Every structure is written in C-alpha cells, then in structure tokens.
Image (cartoon, grey):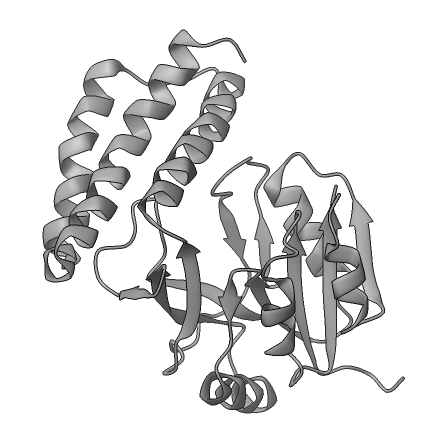
C-alpha cells in the first residue's frame, strides 16, 4: 500500500443502524480506520465491508478511545467523524483540497444538526451540541483529554480558516432521544465531577441554567428554530445542574 495522505477515522460502540451510511460517505479518503469499542452488534462486520483497518478495544474513557483511533491512522492528515455524521460530496472535495494545500495544522468544520428529519442549525453549544468542530487536522496536532464525556482538547500548531461546507450530524432521532442523551451525558459528567473532587455548588449551577439557556436561545439564535431551539437551550441549561445533582446525591 502506498503512503496514505488522508485518513478518515470513526470510533463506534454498537452503531450497526447507521455505520454503513457513515462509512459509505468516507470512500474519498485514502484509508478508513474504525475503532470498535466493546461492540456486541454487527458493527465489526459492517466496518469490514469498507476497510481492513480495524482497532478493537475497551475504553471506558471517551478521550482514550479517540486518541487510540487517531494513533492508528497512517495519513499525515486526519478527518475525524462520528457514526451519526455524513460527509456530503461538496465537503469531501473541499477536505481533499485543504489536506493537499493547507499551510495550517487544523481546521474546524461547520455542522448541520438534524433532529429526526428536521434541520436545526441555530442554538447549539454549551456542551449539548456542536455548531462546528476541529475535525480536520494534521496527525499530532490534536489530542483528547481523559474525560468520559466532552473531553477537553489540546492543539499544537496553527488554526486555519473554517471550512465552507457543512457536515451533516444526525444528532437525535426525536425529542425522546434528545432527553435520553441529556440523561446519559449528565450521568457520565457526574462521574467525572466525583473523580475530580470538585462538583461545584448548587447556586453556581442554578445560575448556569439561565446563562446557558440565554447563550443558546438568544446569543446563538436558537429562537429562530421555534420549539426545537427552545428544547436545545433548555437541555443545555439543565445539563450542569443535573450533572451536579447526580454527582452529589447518587451513588456512582
């Protein structure tokens, strides 16, 4: 095999329902790397249809899982996506062009978030969604912290301009799925808070309900999305206080 110039990497845990759609959109890359984290479904069989570059393991820490997947990539440029994301053709062409010519070390990719079939473009952020993310980078330029959810990022080198084309992110199937994600995220965050020894204060996290709601609903334009924007802002506001209460009141 000749040296790869662009690696696409996906980390998955039991994603048989959507993995094929994700990987099918990554055929433009020189190699596809799939990290399989404790998969018990058909994810491995599906991944084998698209690549021989499989990494299997058990990583309870999200940052460890992502770093292991990145380390397995052989290309000097890496595109990191999740199983619920799709790369449209226009974005694929732009990614290849940037990877072949960029003087920078990492670039953010703007995101179109979908709840079911509804595009919800405004209001994301504050740890309950992403409007953009640093998904295209040189190997060694980006690493993940050791957190269970929303790991911190560390960068080396210079940030380049954001890409023009958007990736499709099918973040939730419906409102119930959104609420389940809030429950899952806040439980994982509670574990991180307990281990850190600093779970914050009730008063501080109550204030964050309003500050995060305002940031998502007003400053980031969630009001433009009607009820969906209100729900996104509400979940963003509730995330810190739920994480705090779980860390304070529940057993690990």
Between residue 23 and residue 201, name the one nearer to us: 23
In the displayed structure image, the side of residue 8 where residue 74 appears, left or right: right
Residue 229 relative to residue 73: left or right = left
Counting from the top left corner in percent of width and height, residue 75 is at 73, 75
| The N terminus lies in quadrant | bottom right
Q: Position of residue 142 (x, y in %)?
A: 58, 59
The residue under the point 80% across, 55% down is: 55
The residue at 45%/29% (across/down) is: 189
Q: Position of residue 221 (x, y in %)?
A: 14, 59
- The residue sitting at 53% across, 85% down in the picture is 92
Taking 9 as reference, is 37 above or below it? Answer: above
Badge count: 0
User: Left or right of 166: which side holds 101?
Assistant: right
- The outermost residue toward the right is 1
The residue lying toward the viewer, choosing from 243 and 134, is: 243
Q: Quadrant of residue 19?
A: bottom right
In this view of the protein, which residue sits in the foreground, 4 or 82? 82
Residue 173 seen anywhere in this rendered image of the structure: yes
Residue 94 position within the rendered picture, expressed as x and y whole percent measured from the top left? 49, 88
Nearest the camera: 85 or 216? 85
The answer, for residue 138, to whether it is visible in the render is no
- Residue at image position (56%, 60%) is 82
Image quadrant holding the C terminus, namely: top right
Q: Is residue 182 left or right of residue 148?
A: left
**Image: 178 above or below 137:** above
């Amino acid at each position: 095999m000749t040296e790869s110039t662009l690696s696409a990497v996906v980390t998955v845990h039991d994603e048989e329902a959507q993995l094929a759609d994700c990987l099918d959109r990554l055929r433009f890359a020189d190699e596809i790397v799939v990290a399989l984290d404790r998969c018990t479904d058909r994810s491995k069989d599906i991944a084998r249809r698209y690549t021989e570059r499989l990494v299997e393991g058990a990583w309870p820490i999200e940052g460890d899982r992502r770093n292991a997947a990145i380390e397995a990539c052989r290309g000097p440029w890496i595109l990191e996506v999740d199983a619920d994301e799709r790369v449209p053709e226009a974005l694929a062409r732009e990614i290849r062009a940037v990877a072949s010519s960029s003087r920078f070390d990492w670039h953010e990719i703007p995101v179109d978030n979908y709840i079911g079939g509804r595009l919800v473009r405004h209001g994301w952020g504050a740890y309950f969604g992403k409007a953009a993310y640093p998904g295209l980078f040189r190997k060694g330029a980006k690493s993940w912290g050791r957190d269970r959810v929303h790991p911190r990022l560390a960068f080396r080198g210079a940030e380049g301009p954001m890409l023009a084309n958007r990736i499709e992110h099918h973040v939730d199937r419906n409102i119930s799925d959104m609420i389940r994600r809030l429950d899952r995220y806040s439980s994982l965050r509670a574990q991180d808070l307990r281990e850190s020894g600093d779970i914050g204060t009730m008063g501080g996290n109550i204030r964050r309900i309003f500050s995060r709601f305002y940031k998502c609903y007003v400053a980031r334009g969630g009001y433009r999305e009607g009820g969906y924007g209100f729900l996104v802002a509400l979940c963003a506001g509730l995330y810190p206080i739920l994480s705090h209460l779980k860390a304070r009141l529940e057993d690990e």
